[in-house]
Image (cartoon, helix red, strand yellow):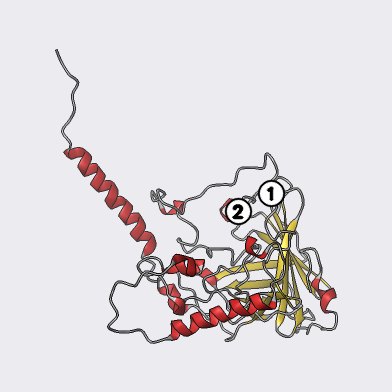
Amino acid sequence: MRRALILTLSVSMLALAGQATAETKPAAAASAFKSPKNAFGQPDLSGFWTNATLTPMTRSPTVGGRPVYTPEEVKKMEAAVAQEVEEGNAPTDPNAPAEAPKVDASKIRPEFAAAGGDVGGYNRGWLDPGSTIMRVHGEPRTSLLTTPNGMPPARKAGAPTPPRFGGGMGSFDNPEQRSLGERCILSFGRNAGPPMFPNGFYNNNYQIMQTPDSVVIEVEMVHDYRVVRLNSKHRVDNVRPYMGDSIGWWEGDTLVVETTHIPAAQQFMGSWKDLKVTERFTRVGKNRLHYGFQVEDPTVWEKPWGGEYEFSPMAQAVLYEYACHEGNYALPGMLGGARAEEAEKAKAAAAKPATTGSTN
């Protein structure tokens, strides 16, 4: 899609600060740094930020439960990305065969395999999944989640069944059955949140804007805007806007954001109706914005849990328009293909001779 043409390449995650749980207030770990204030006297969180990173949301079993990578592991992983970039920037042979050579799938990063496995898929030049390990308080983390094993906790027995939506084969009857990302309504992955995560592909960039009454988070992917009302109360009806109903307040230099009323279409790991997400944004360095989150739903999990990471500044302070619908032939193509397939099946069925029961 043309939207790939307007992605902004994000920078590596800078990060630097000490291990904490989702409930830890990061300001205590960085007490030497004093957050600058904006014209309204608020801690200044404004600017252009990115959360692109090599660190996955959940911890791989290959690290043996360790919350932190070794220096050798970090060096190897970040060097591999530098090599990917170098290979991706190499000139393409104009006489190369049209059929690409087969590559061992086990040697391809999952996000690259997913994006480049079909016709029109992106190669490394179009992707920006991050080039460094996420460091939080100086520690190279093995996962963004801060649970003991870096994985979501088990669901409670009898927890509500996660809602099911379209987005896979066999769900082409109408646009509403397709995913929000395919319909250009919201970002795929959880860029907009809450909680907010990098998507592993590209456009993991944000702009934070502050006013006396609200904080606005512009999300590059699909050009979403989260509006956080300061010193307000949650709505009392059952209207569930995309990205939920967010209210915020200041606790010292930390912006606390509480979100409820999350719609079913944005369920998080099967939770939505009773889901509450609490996020904390704290400027812990000139080029570091700590982000911690906690999720809770008493109908799904025994107790609250969460994670943390650090935003770093974008290399180029600008977000371009994510014109998702420009040249978006995928959705009408899928629906049109389904209609053509239905017509062919109907034609074939009509051409079959009618069967009649036997008579004596």
- Residue sitting at x 51%, y 82%: 83
Name the residue beneath numbered marker 2. Answer: 267
* Mark 2 residue type: Gln
Q: Are marks 2 and 1 in contact (CB under 8 Å)?
A: no
In the image, taking residue 28 as reference, residue 64 lies left or right, namely left
Examine the rendered structure and indicate whether residue 104 appears above or below residue 237.
below
Q: Quadrant of the C terminus?
A: top left
Question: Where, quadrant-wise, is the N terminus in this rendering?
Answer: bottom left
Q: Is residue 208 visible?
A: no
Foreground residue among 85 and 64: 64
Residue 52 placement (x, y as % from top left): 60, 75
The tag on residue 154 is 1
Q: Residue at x 45, y 73 (%)?
A: 323
Residue 323 in the image: above or below residue 345:
below
What number is the disc on residue 301? Answer: none
Amino acid type, mark 1: Ala
Residue 259, above or below 351: below
Q: Position of residue 232 (x, y in %)?
A: 75, 63
Mark 1 packing: few (<14 Cα in 10 Å), some, or many (20+)? few
**Helix, strand or loop at mark 1:** loop
**Residue 127 in the figure: left or right of residue 247:** left
Q: Mark 2 or mark 1: which comes first in sequence?
A: 1
